[in-house]
Image (cartoon, helix red, strand yellow):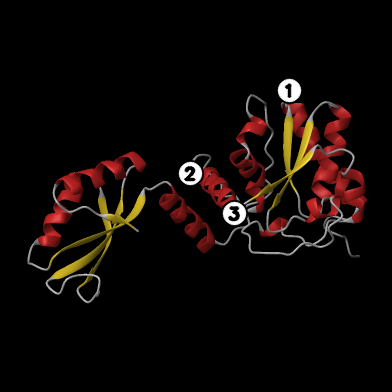
Amino acid sequence: MFVHPFNDIDVIAGQGTIALEMLQDAPDLDVIPVPVGGAGLIAGVATAAKHLKPEISILGVEPASFPSLTARMRGLGVPNMGQTIAEGIAVRQVGDLGYAIARPLIDDVLLIEEPFFERAVALYCNVEKTVAEGAGSASLAAVLAYPERFRGKKVGLILTGGNIDTRLLASVLTRELVREQRLVSLRFIGDDRPGLLGYVSAIIGASGANIVEVTHNRLSLDVPAKGAEFDIMIETRDQKHTQELIQVLQERGYPPRPL
């Protein structure tokens, strides 16, 4: 027997038990942002939540590159698709049954750009020590993308899964280090003489930063023939520490250019 993953009344009813459990544990919730792919999850959650607490706000959350519910609500047909790490909700068309149930119960739909999915995955991993896939982190991504919509409210986040490739997870976590300026590449141009790289490295080390990678280029045409170009990737504690290091290097006569 084929059971549809979202366009099925029993599947929708089963997913509604999420809202039952959430409101049983936290009856004072004000809003629940719900990941939207085929609209089965939000149909079940909205039905149960609105029945128990009619004033609660239900917000749909979907990738900006797969705005299936938004397009259906606005009568735009099947939208153009793009790339997203929220693969679990990258659905071309919402189900007719889920849409019919959810449409009168939801308050709004929020479209999320990719960096917010990445930040949410990284936060779950680094703060909660929980592995979340892109789609699974959608509720938290909505809070990050639209903080004013949730400020001062009690929000119930639904984490829907942790099926993420380990290489993708590693990439997301590394990209978050770059986004937070804890992993930065700096470019220096200096004289090509013995000891210069060691001198700059000593400054970096004395400042408490860690050198991850060094590239030494003597053939760049942007550099004088007697000069050399250095690209040094460093790891710091945070953005403030990075800026302090850049300031020290400038004061020592080797102003870097962040790449």
Q: What residue sits 61% from the left and 35% below the top?
A: 147
The residue sitting at the left extreme is 194
Give how far across and how far down residue 43 sits, in percent. 85, 44
- Neighbourhood count class around disc 2 (C-alpha, 10 Å): few under 14, some 14–19, many 20 upward: few
Residue on which disc 1 sits:
28
Q: In which quarter of the image is residue 237?
A: top left
Residue on which disc 2 sits:
126
Q: Which of marks 2 and 3 is nearer the N terminus?
A: 3
- Amino acid type, mark 3: Glu
User: In the rendered image, which quarter contains the C terminus?
Assistant: bottom left
User: In the rendered image, which quarter contains the N terminus?
Assistant: bottom right
Give yes or no for contact between labels 2 and 1 (Cβ–Cβ under 8 Å). no
Give how far across and how far down residue 45 sits, in percent. 81, 40
- Neighbourhood count class around disc 3 (C-alpha, 10 Å): few under 14, some 14–19, many 20 upward: some
Q: Which of 132 and 145 is in front in this view?
A: 145
187 left or right of 131 in image: left
